[in-house]
Image: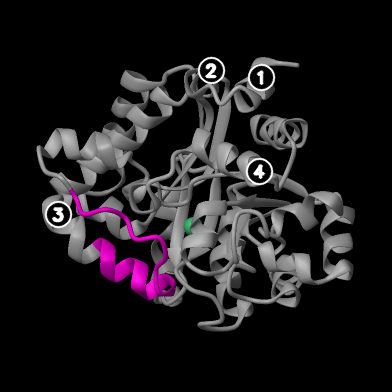
């Protein structure tokens, strides 16, 4: 048994923190550890509720309880620093963090953004494989973004593209112009889909946009056919258990669809999504699934190894 499996069975947090892990579904501005931020701000945030009323409820809680204490460019930069500090604390050896164009503009555009991020990266976790991801809100003005996406992706800084912020806001076809540009610069294509949306949505998104990874995608577990499609095409799902449970997209850790997805051979990774909100860091995500009996230590280890490959 390796250190990771031992750590789970022995409930040894230190050992679990030290085991090499990945976090590849991480919204950078909400990616820092709550305790770290509390210490830096010398301010105690209210306890995270057990459940949020969907994405809107989550956003409302974040805007009301946390954001007022770390607003504007300064606040975002502080939260970015925290996200890299967490990668160091948790031995995250492969880190994919996503950033939105508005965040980049808020800190003075691409050059200044790259300098800030690279600085935190080198100071905290220079040995980590860091793969920045550009992420668009599903309700964004695609025409406008299409016109300026090359400002962000032509330097080669970003390794992947994503769309987040609610599903079924508009047809997948609307995003083709952005994904075409991403393709030109060899970005890995991903999207948030199948979190609230259906299994069929997952397949459609892959087919229309040529995705190779899905953020969430848990509702694919409702269709044997879609799961087979994902396996045959080698599509990876970047799953975030606490996010799903707390937003009400999964009933519990024990009943989390990751079990069915695993049993059907779908390629999976385990991630934090919004650590600052859900207050569950990456080692804890593995621990919660192990403790609930959802997956065995060996199965969780296999998923951990998937994340390290990429
Ligand atoms: Zn997400």
Q: Is residue 83 visible?
A: yes
Residue 292 location, x and y as percent?
Answer: 63, 47
Residue 6, labelled with which disc? 1
Q: Which residues are magenta?
A: 45-62
Q: How many marks?
A: 4
The verdict on label 4 being within 8 Å of ligand 1 is: no
Q: For marks 4 and 1, give the CA distance.
A: 20 Å
- In this rendering, the answer to whether 64 lies above or below 24 is below
- In which quarter of the view is residue 2 placed? top right
Q: For marks 2 and 3, give the CA distance.
A: 37 Å
Label 1's element? helix
Tag 4 or tag 2, which sits nearer the N-term?
2
Residue 50 location, x and y as percent?
Answer: 40, 60
Image-based side of 262 in relation to 274, left or right: right
Which residue is disc 2 drawn over?
Answer: 15
Name the residue rendered at 43%, 44% in the picture.
280
Residue 20 location, x and y as percent?
Answer: 57, 22
Which residue is disc 3 drawn over?
Answer: 72
Name the residue rendered at 61%, 71% in the picture.
176
Image-based side of 52 in relation to 295, left or right: left
């Amino acid at each position: 048994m390796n250190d990771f499996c031992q750590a789970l069975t022995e409930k040894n947090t230190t050992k679990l923190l030290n085991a090499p892990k990945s976090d590849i579904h991480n919204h950078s501005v909400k990616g820092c550890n709550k305790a770290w931020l509390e210490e830096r701000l010398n301010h105690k945030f209210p306890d995270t509720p057990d459940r949020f009323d969907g994405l809107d409820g989550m956003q409302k809680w974040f805007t009301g309880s946390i954001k007022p204490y770390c607003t504007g460019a300064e606040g975002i930069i502080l939260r970015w620093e925290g996200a890299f500090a967490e990668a160091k604390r948790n031995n995250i050896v492969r880190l994919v963090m996503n950033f939105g164009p508005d965040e980049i503009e808020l800190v003075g555009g691409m050059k200044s953004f790259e300098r800030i991020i690279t600085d935190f990266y080198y100071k905290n976790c220079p040995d980590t494989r860091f793969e920045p991801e550009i992420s668009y809100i599903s309700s964004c003005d695609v025409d406008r973004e299409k016109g300026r996406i090359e400002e962000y992706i032509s330097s080669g800084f970003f390794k992947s593209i994503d769309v987040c912020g609610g599903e079924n806001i508009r047809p997948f076809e609307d995003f083709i112009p952005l994904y075409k540009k991403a393709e030109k610069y060899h970005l890995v294509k991903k999207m948030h889909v199948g979190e609230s949306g259906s299994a069929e949505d997952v397949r459609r998104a892959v087919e229309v946009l040529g995705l190779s990874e899905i953020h969430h995608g848990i509702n694919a577990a409702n269709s044997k056919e879609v799961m087979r499609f994902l396996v045959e095409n080698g599509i990876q799902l970047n799953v975030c258990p606490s996010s799903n449970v707390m937003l009400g997209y999964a009933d519990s850790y024990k009943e989390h669809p990751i079990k069915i997805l695993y049993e059907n051979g779908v390629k999976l990774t385990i991630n934090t999504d919004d650590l600052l909100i859900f207050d569950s860091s990456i080692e804890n995500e593995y621990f919660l699934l192990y403790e609930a009996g959802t997956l065995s230590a060996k199965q969780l280890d296999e998923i951990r190894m998937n994340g390290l490959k990429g």
